[in-house]
Amino acid sequence: MAKTRIAVAGAGYIGLAHMGVAQQSPTCTLSAIVDPALVTEAIAAKAGVPLYKSLDELFEKDRPDGVILATPNPLHLEHGLKCIAAGVPALLEKPIASTVREGEALVTEVDKTGAKVLIGHHRAHSPIMARAKELIDEGRLGKLVAGRF
């Protein structure tokens, strides 16, 4: 069975984490990195995958099964729309966009096209957050008046 080919756009901290998971996965493979920074050349060479400077270049030359968008927040709408237009499913790291209006624009396009876009939030799977929820549910922290997740 062929592995699912995943490209990662954005080679910062979160992008590197996604790359590592793809490289260790029994079902996925890292197929490409998308990032305009010069330092990314060494990362792509070490990973043994092609480097593209933009999503446009990626989609012109390759067709991954999915793209993980770990790019700066102000680029989320633009990059999400590019994946939708290319018909490539995307995991978009949080936040969905920089503004509510941009987030609504992306959701509207997903609804209109039926595109597959997932918003990633790593804390949803955190054992620390699960334990914190248990403590809250048990009432062990008293009455909560504020929180930051």
Image (cartoon, rainbow, N blue to C red):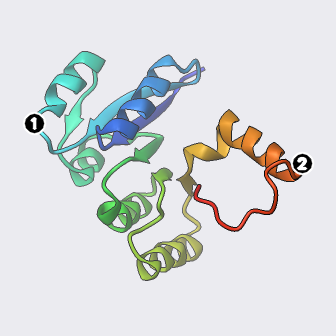
Which residue is at a point 57% across and 55% down the rendered structure image? Answer: 118
Residue indicated by mark 2: 138
Direction bottom: furthest residue: 101
Asked whether, in this view, residue 107 is left or right of residue 88, the answer is right
Which mark sits nearer the N-terminus, 2 or 1? 1
Disc 1 residue crowd, few under 14, some 14–19, many 20+, Cα 10 Å: few
Residue indicated by mark 1: 38
Asked whether, in this view, residue 74 is left or right of residue 101, the answer is left
Direction right: furthest residue: 138
> The residue tagged with tag 1: helix, strand or loop?
loop
The one nearer the camera, 121 or 78, is 121
Direction left: furthest residue: 38
Mark 2 vs mark 1: in front: 2
Quadrant the N terminus occupies: top right
The one nearer the camera, 144 or 5, is 144
> The residue tagged with tag 2: helix, strand or loop?
helix
Amino acid carrying label 1: it is Leu
The quadrant where residue 84 appears = bottom left
Amino acid carrying label 2: it is Glu
Which residue is at a point 53% across and 73% down the rendered structure image? Answer: 107
Q: Where residue 101 sits in the image (x, y, percent)?
A: 44, 83
Which residue is at a point 38% across and 70% down the rendered structure image? Answer: 98
